[in-house]
Amino acid sequence: MDIDTLEKELRETEEGIHALFQAGKIPTPEDYAGVDRIKAELKVARRVKAMDAKRTDPKLTRKISILMPEDEFQALTKKATDAGVDISKYIRSLLKS
């Protein structure tokens, strides 16, 4: 969920608890659990937004799998090490060139 939706949901849930107090009723632990859940989701969403804003490299969101014989894998790993990068970055650089 996005931050605005979570903030709106949190406001509505807190207003519901406040309305229970106004009506002279005591909120249940489930009412407070809902608030805690929303606050936790909101905290994560804000952290992700901040990390995305500071990100300089593009976010890696897709994954592919390649099957190869062990000797080819070892040769590719050695070339990546010689280039000073991990195997994933090395394969991406091969694909770009």
Image (cartoon, rainbow, N blue to C red):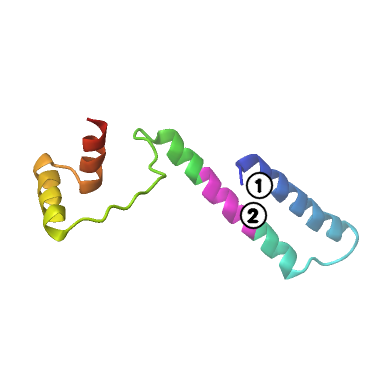
Does residue 54 appear to the left or right of 26 in the view shown?
Answer: left
Please say if 1 is above or below 16: above
Q: Which mark is residue 74?
A: none
Badge 1 vs badge 2, beta-carbon distance below 8 Å: yes
Residue range (magenta): 37-46
Instruction: Please state the horizontal and vertical placement of residue 69, each as a whole percent of the image.
Output: 17, 58
Q: Residues within 10 Å of mark 1 (few under 14, many from 20)?
A: some
Q: Residue at x 72, y 67 (%)?
A: 30
Decide if residue 87 is on the left or right side of residue 1: left
Please state the horizontal and vertical placement of residue 55, each as a whole percent of the image.
Answer: 39, 36
Residue found at x 8% / y 43%: 82
The answer to whether residue 38 is magenta is: yes
**Up/down of 71 relative to 48, above or below:** below
Residue 68 in magenta stretch: no
- Residue situated in front as seen by the camera: 49 or 87: 87
**Residue at label 2?**
38
**Mark 2: few, some, or many residues within 10 Å (few <14, many ≥20)?**
some
Q: Magenta-highlighted stretch: main secondary structure?
A: helix
Instruction: Determine the secondary structure under disc 2.
Output: helix
Q: Nearer the viewer, residue 6 or 92?
A: 92
Q: Which mark is residue 6?
A: 1
| Image spot of residue 67 (x, y percent) | 26, 56
Disc on the earlier residue, 1 or 2? 1
Quadrant where the C terminus is found in the figure: top left
Q: Among all residues in the image, which is located at the extreme bottom?
A: 29
